[in-house]
Amino acid sequence: MDKKTTLKDIAAICNCSVTTVSRALKKSPTISKAMQQRVSETAQKLGYIPNSLATSMRTGSTNTIAACLQDFRNPFFAAIAKYIESYSRKQGYFSLFTTTNEQPSHEYEVCKSLLEKNVDGILFFPIQRDTKAVELLIQQHIPLVLVGRYFDEIDTDYVISDDAQGAYLVTKHLISKNAKNILFMNVSNSISSARNREIGYLRALCEHGLTPHVLEGSMEYGKTREAIMDMADSLRHYDAIITFCDIMGFEAYHTLSGMGYRIPSDIMLASLDGLQQDIILPIELTCAGTNRRLMVEKSVNLLLDKIKGCSTDEKQHIMIEQYLLEGSTT
């Protein structure tokens, strides 16, 4: 096996010291332009790849940010990851991705591993079953930005979308379509976005004097199907269903169709993600959407400010607006 090219190999060909090679590659003004070009061309010819670990040991920086996501199965996070990688690269940073699979025990261990990898900062998409992971990150003084969710009891920098606004717009839209009994299949109220989406749903109903119907469901595969099957006898009482997110919405669509319901003529269906903004899908759910690209850019910029020491001590709370996307299900 051929050995890896080193600075010493380049120095031997260029007839100079290793220190000169190192400085030339960094374009130090102490090295002549001619020598910089000679070293650069030799390094390229030999296929030299810098040792980032050695560099990080000298500088204390890896130029790497990590994104701790919740579930790669959810296309929402695939779109988020794409925007993070693309925008971070433009800022000169490498992106490292990991997932917690919605498991609190995994979340803590994943965050611990990221600290061991010496990343410069973390974009954290919390599960919100407990606060152990975020408390660990705060304790270690790692630059940190929460994305999508926040903790009431712990003040952190965060970037979220206006979940209450999105749920309000979707509920108002269903009401405009003459829906009177609207079921909201939410998830645990320990999740900040679930609480805010329920607030928007309730506000819209209150404005029209309608009765709320809330069912706590789950994003776990198969759970939405189980919930709908369990309430088969009472489904006829509802004009519409709103699900917490699109993957729950698609599972609801598949289940309702299998039960013989025609959507939207028998029952309307809406959701709160807007995946069709990023992915071509066979079914366009009526939903609330948000500018995920803008959300990512705001999150990365905030994190890089913290990494570079440009941020203030005051925590930044950024909210991105949501809007209605009318699909074929209402």
Image (spheres, rainbow, N blue to C red):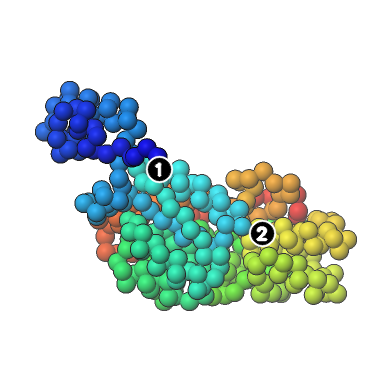
Residue 128 x/y as whole percent: 50, 72
The quarter in which the N terminus is drawn is top left
- The vertical placement of 126 against 61, above or below, is below
Q: Amino acid at mark 2?
A: Ile
- Residue at the far top in the pictured view: 34
Is residue 211 found left or right of 324 in the rendered image? right
Q: Amino acid at mark 1?
A: Arg
Please, is residue 246 above or below residue 154 in the view?
A: above
- Horizontally, residue 137 falls left or right of residue 83, namely left
Which residue in the protein does label 1 denote?
89
Q: CA distance from mark 1 to mark 2?
A: 29 Å
Instruction: Give the secondary structure at mark 2.
Output: helix
Residue 155 horizontal/vertical position (percent):
37, 71
Ranked by sequence position, the earlier of labels 1 and 2 is 1
Q: Which dot, 1 or 2, sits closer to the camera? A: 1
Query: Would you place residue 289 above or below residue 140 in this image?
Result: above
Query: Image check: 59 left or right of 220?
Result: left
User: Which residue lies under the disc numbered 2?
Assistant: 247
Does residue 193 show up? no
Front position in the image: 304 or 26: 26
Viewer can see residue 31? yes
Residue 272 pos. (x, y %) = 62, 59
Q: Percent position (x, y) of residue 186?
A: 64, 70
Label 2 near label 1: C-beta < 8 Å? no
Quadrant (top left, top right, bottom left, bottom right) of the C terminus: bottom right
Answer few, some or many: residues within 10 Å of disc 2's Cα (few below 14, many 20 plus, some between 14 and 19). many
Nearer to me, 99 or 159: 99
At x 42%, y 50%, the residue is: 95
The one of 287 and 147 positioned closer to us in this rendering: 147
For image coordinates 65% across by 70% down, the residue present is 218
